[in-house]
DNA sequence: CGGGTGTCTTGACAGTTGTCAAGGAAAATC
DNA sequence: GATTTTCCTTGACAACTGTCAAGACACCCG
């Protein structure tokens, strides 16, 4: 009775016409991600999110139980766009130097074009240190990103004919650290942030391989 | 007229009895840091901060113009406790292995004992990607931390008789990345987070030196 | 065409937030 | 001891938040 939305969320999605339901959820998620990327997790209210969509603020509770459910859905939705980001780099490269150049170029490209999304990700990951409900989704994505980096690194090792000298977690931590630094520098307006990142990655990648 | 606090903040601190003024500011800052470390930047309200002190919520505007001025003051105040953290490691070590062990132990110690402060720092640094007013203070501290790491790394190189193979920024980014990862894992309850950090640091530090 | 269901808007609620003014208490000054 | 200055509390304000109920609109099936 109070539950038209709850029933909806619980029951299996209505067969024929209700990809529309999931479609709306994704539409909401995309608007939300844009607003979240602009304002950050804390300052992005449901009304602001709805304002940046073509709907009104009440509609969120028709498609999502909570603000948290929306956020978590957004995070997972966002993940789908990330995982394959460097697959072409891995697939198309035929030499270690080529892979390195392509990888660095791709890093710079996404840092430039999707800076709001990246800072949102770091925001959410940090917030998960304060809010347990976020932790599961964040941990899952973090593992996914670690795997993504690991595919690049191990392909790089393969092309170099040398084994990787560290664990997947360490390789991810190292590269994530310099990427995060470059993101902050770039958002702060540093004109050399992008080239610095390229230089750092070129300097770092050989070090992840064993002598 | 509306400005008893503004005058106060602007004019040079009253000579004799008014280290009390700065003392209160520091007292407020310490309470605020504790609350901020517990709740994070977004959820730490001025009332909550004041509740965790021995004062009432209105007093904040007597000593600080803004919430932001309080936060920035806290960040700078916090910095003072950080910079010298590894100085003893640098001063007391006589061999590369000894320095490495002492450094890793210190990292684990602070990760364990001051986890809320560390997640607050990462929170504030991330928030500075959304709020320009935070950026200046954050950038300043980040540079300070970079210098702190650089002193460790270059001392390590000195003891090893080999030059450092990367820039201060890169070395800081790398170590900060793995530390942040370990912090998240530790807060998430991973029982191996601390030993993993030790292992990663031991594996990583030799790589920052040139062959 | 009329009833019914899915979709969305509107308006309201209780709670919280930063901010500040008015005033009391305490301390310092004369 | 009286008065001024410093310090702190109290209470209020407007704005904003997540949440949800009541109802309007549109669409489809009988």
Image (cartoon, coloured by chain):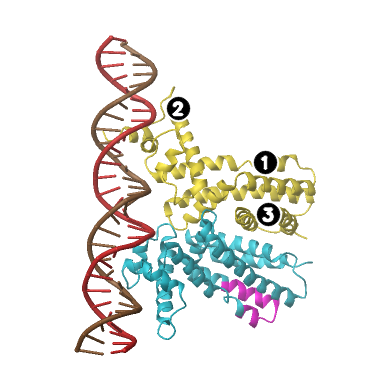
Chain colours: A yellow, B cyan, C red, D brown
Q: Quadrant of the C terminus of chain A?
A: bottom right
Q: Which mark is residue A20?
A: 2
Residue at 75% x, 39% y: name it.
A92
Chain that bears disc 3? A
Name the residue carrying label 1: A87
Discs 2, 3: same chain: yes
> Contact, CB < 8 Å: mark 2 with mark 3?
no
Kindly report the distance in space between the C-alpha atoms of the residues bearing marks 2 and 3: 44 Å
Q: Is residue A157 above or below residue B49?
A: above
Discs 1, 2: same chain: yes
How crowded is the residue under tag 2: few (<14 C-alpha within 10 Å), some, or many (20+)?
Answer: few
Secondary-structure class at tag 1: helix
Residue A59 horizontal side relative to residue A88, left or right: left
Chain that bears disc 1? A
Name the residue carrying label 3: A191
Q: Quadrant of the N terminus of chain A?
A: top left
Name the spot of residue C10 as percent of width and height, x first: 31, 34
> Contact, CB < 8 Å: mark 1 with mark 2?
no
Going from the N terminus, do you reach mark 1 or mark 2 first?
Answer: 2
Single out the mark in the foreground, 2 or 3.
3
| Residues drawn in magenta | B88-106
């Amino acid at each position: 009775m109070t539950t038209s939305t709850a029933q909806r969320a619980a029951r299996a999605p209505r067969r024929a016409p209700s990809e529309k339901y999931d479609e709306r959820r994704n539409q909401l998620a995309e608007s939300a991600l844009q607003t979240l990327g602009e304002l950050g997790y804390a300052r992005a209210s449901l009304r602001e999110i709805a304002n940046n969509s073509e709907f009104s603020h009440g509609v969120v509770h028709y498609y999502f139980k909570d603000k948290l459910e929306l956020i978590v859905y957004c995070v997972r939705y966002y993940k789908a766009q990330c995982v394959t980001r460097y697959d072409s780099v891995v697939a198309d490269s035929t030499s270690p130097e080529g892979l390195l150049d392509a990888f660095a170029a791709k890093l710079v490209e996404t840092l430039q074009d999707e800076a709001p999304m990246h800072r949102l990700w770091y925001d959410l990951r940090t917030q998960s240190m304060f809010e347990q409900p976020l932790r599961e989704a964040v941990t899952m994505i973090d593992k996914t990103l670690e795997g993504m980096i690991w595919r690049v690194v191990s392909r790089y090792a393969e092309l170099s004919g040398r084994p990787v000298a560290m664990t997947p977690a360490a390789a991810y931590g190292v590269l994530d650290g310099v990427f995060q630094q470059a993101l902050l520098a770039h958002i702060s307006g540093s004109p050399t942030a992008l080239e610095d990142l390229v230089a750092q990655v070129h300097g770092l990648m050989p070090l992840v391989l064993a002598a």
